[in-house]
Image (cartoon, rainbow, N blue to C red):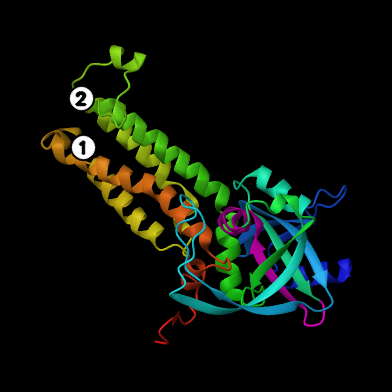
């Protein structure tokens, strides 16, 4: 069953992606997938990896459930709004609690996926285990660790044979480490601008404040802005097409870069405009982290928001029948 399921997984992925066994010794991860992109007649590595636990069954068990909206689980306890729902077909599978707890302790910086192979249909269902734990399991069943195993639910439409959905989802998970690294960089850069502007979001005076003058050194500001723009302009997170807000943010970066490519004397004519452009741009950049945590990580989960944000949003049923 294991050999057959691995062959089904490999045949369900793009031929130019590299699949490597990672199960000797077995720590719960069976394969590592390295993502590649076509480049002319060749293929280039993206430096992106997926860690996968592969499970197989002779035939999957299906169930249909009502999925209700819940409050943002990043900051609220699990509370369902039962005035509306989505009827969804789900694949159910009992996963060992030890594996889930290991993934929870690992954190979310690298995506760990579950591939569940149905040997009767040769279909492979997928879900991101990190996101399932953080956005579904822990909020709804915080005591799951006391169980021997946990019943997991995977939306039945989330299959590797759906190539458009597969490419959107797996590419999103593959870019996770790059997203988190970029968010950290944006936050650092914004903090440096705030120190340069002597602008604080928290009323704490540091030793650096006693060394820096209160007046803005405009030449240092321009130098720093150009340097920061060169760093973030080169990031390849902007190439991911499955999150449209990235393309909008890239346009703003491009416009800001064009503005700061002017001669220093031109920039100096309207220092307030230059300052405001930077403040707005980096405010939006740092907000990407919030959007990612609250919305993007809900994608492809058996949850109301994630299902509505998918490629084929299901119909919403209201309690009054409308």
Depicted 99 relative to depicted 196: above or below: below
* Percent position of residue 60, x then y: 77, 77
The residue nearer to you, when weighing 159 against 18, is: 159
- On screen, residue 45 versus residue 278, left or right, reads right
The residue where tag 2 is placed is 216
Q: Residue furthest left?
A: 269
Q: Nearer the viewer, residue 14 or 96?
A: 96
Element carrying mark 1:
helix
The residue shown at (77%, 58%) is 149
Q: Is residue 101 magenta?
A: no
The relative height of residue 194 versus residue 214 in the rendered view (above or below) is below
Q: Are marks 2 and 1 in contact (CB under 8 Å)?
A: yes
Q: In front: 288, or 297?
A: 297
Specify the segment rendered in magenta: 119-140
Which quadrant of the rendered structure holds the C terminus?
Answer: bottom left
Q: Which residue is rendered at x = 64% and y = 61% of the image? A: 42
* Left or right for 145, reference 70: right
Apparent side of residue 293 relative to residue 209 in the rendered image (left or right): right
Name the element at disc 2: loop
**Dot 2 alpha-carbon crowd within 10 angstroms: few under 14, some 14 to 19, many 20 or more:** few
Q: Identify the residue position indicated by label 1 in the image.
A: 275
Q: Please tell me how crowded label 1 is: few (under 14), some (14-19), or many (20+) other residues with Cα within 10 Å.
A: some
Q: Residue furthest bottom?
A: 321
Residue 14 seen in this snapshot = no
x, y percent for residue 6? 81, 67
**What is the spatial separation of the Cα atoms under label 2 and label 1, in whole angstroms?**
10 Å
Is 129 included in the stretch rendered in magenta?
Answer: yes
């Amino acid at each position: 069953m294991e050999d057959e399921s691995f062959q089904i997984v490999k045949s369900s992925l793009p031929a130019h992606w590299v699949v490597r066994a990672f199960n000797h010794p077995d720590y719960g991860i069976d394969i590592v997938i390295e993502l590649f992109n076509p480049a002319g007649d060749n293929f280039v590595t993206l430096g992106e990896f997926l860690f996968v636990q592969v499970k197989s069954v002779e035939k999957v068990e299906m169930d249909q459930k009502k999925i209700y909206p819940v409050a943002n689980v990043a900051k609220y306890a699990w509370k369902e709004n039962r005035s509306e729902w989505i009827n969804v077909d789900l694949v159910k599978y009992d996963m060992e609690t030890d594996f889930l707890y290991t993934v929870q302790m690992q954190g979310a910086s690298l995506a760990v996926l579950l591939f569940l192979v149905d040997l009767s249909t040769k279909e492979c269902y997928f879900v991101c285990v990190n996101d399932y734990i953080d956005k579904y399991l822990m909020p709804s069943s915080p005591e799951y660790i006391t169980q021997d195993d946990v019943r997991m639910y995977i939306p039945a439409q989330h299959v590797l044979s759906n190539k458009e959905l597969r490419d959107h989802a797996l590419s999103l998970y593959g870019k996770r480490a790059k997203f988190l690294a970029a968010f950290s960089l944006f936050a650092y850069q914004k903090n440096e601008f705030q120190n340069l502007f002597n602008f604080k979001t928290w009323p704490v005076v540091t030793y650096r404040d006693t060394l820096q003058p209160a007046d803005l050194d405009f030449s240092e500001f321009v130098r720093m802005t150009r340097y920061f723009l060169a760093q973030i302009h080169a990031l390849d997170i902007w190439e991911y097409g499955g999150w449209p807000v990235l393309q909008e943010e890239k346009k703003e970066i491009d416009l800001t870069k064009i503005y700061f490519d002017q001669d220093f004397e031109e920039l100096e004519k309207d220092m307030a405009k230059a300052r405001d452009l930077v403040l707005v741009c980096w405010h939006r950049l740092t907000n990407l982290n919030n959007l990612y945590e609250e919305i993007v990580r809900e994608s492809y989960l058996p949850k109301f928001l994630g299902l509505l944000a998918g490629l084929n949003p299901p119909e919403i049923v209201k309690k009054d029948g409308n």
